[in-house]
Image (cartoon, helix red, strand yellow):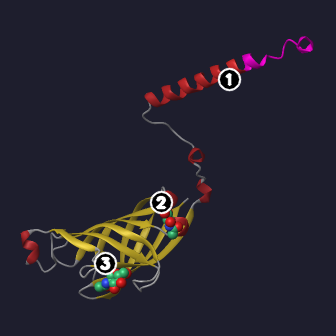
Amino acid sequence: MANTLPKILPSFSSLVFIIMILTVAVAVTTSAKHDSFFHELLFPTELGISQQDEKLTHLHFFFHDIVSGTNQTAVRVAAAPSSETSPTGFGSVVMMDDPLTETADRSSKIVGRAQGMYGSASQSELGLLMVMSFAFTEGEYNGSSLSVLGRNTVESAVREMPIVGGSGVFRFCRGYAQAKTHSIDEMEAVVEYDVYVFHY
Ligand SMILES: *[C@@H]1O[C@H](CO)[C@@H](O)[C@H](O)[C@H]1NC(C)=O
Ligand SMILES: *[C@@H]1O[C@H](CO)[C@@H](O)[C@H](O)[C@H]1NC(C)=O
């Protein structure tokens, strides 16, 4: 029977051989590219991005900065000797891992955490430099984060801080956050955040 097959059809073993050669060739090409790789131009579609698909998302949550008590989430980690006498606490730095919740009630659903630090950066008013990630844990945003870097004059009714980037669903993002103090006492400051970001 085998003798009746046309001679131009490659045998099974020669097909396997051709596939092996092709595989090796692809592997060599790929590794050569990566060994000497510094930069390249990409089409956005190569990262699964279509520029027409840019979205604007509004996120809304409450930030709980708990500065004392058993569930403290913000701790002072450094201060200048003069911070103690400075009316604005100038030079002190606080590290935080603050819960972000759906409503102003601290026991409401946690949607993420604000992880980072703030420092008193003004000698004339309560003006903080905020450097933090909003690390989300809820729904489609679970595992994605936003990076905030900005000025927070905590006594102003509304403070605006730039969103300088993000990860996960927020790759390539840009936007801004508006913060309004909801309540404040010696134990805890609750701040309402409205965040507007462009992302893909
Ligand atoms: C700390 O958190 C626990 C668990 O959520 C809660 O039961 C407790 O009342 C909190 N303590 C304070 C002082 O808020
Ligand atoms: C978020 O993702 C983590 C890690 O994948 C998972 O353990 C957790 O259950 C998720 N949370 C929600 C609320 O989906």
Near mark 2 (Cα within 10 A), the count class, few <14, some 14-19 or many ≥20, is many
Label 2 secondary element: loop
Q: Is residue 100 left or right of residue 43?
A: left
Q: Is residue 90 visible?
A: yes
Residue positioned 59% across, 26% down in the render: 26
- Residue 93 lies, in percent from the top left, at 20, 68
Q: Nearer the viewer, residue 50 or 26?
A: 26
Q: Are marks 1 and 3 in contact (CB under 8 Å)?
A: no
Q: Is residue 142 visible?
A: no
| Three-letter amino acid code at the position of disc 2 | Cys
Q: Earlier in the sequence, mark 3 or mark 2?
A: 3
Q: How many marks?
A: 3
Circle 2 is placed at which residue position?
173
Q: Which residues are magenta?
A: 1-15
Circle 3 is placed at which residue position?
65
> Which quarter of the rendered image does ligand 1 occupy?
bottom left
Label 3 secondary element: strand
- Residue 149 lies, in percent from the top left, at 33, 64
- Circle number at residue 19: 1
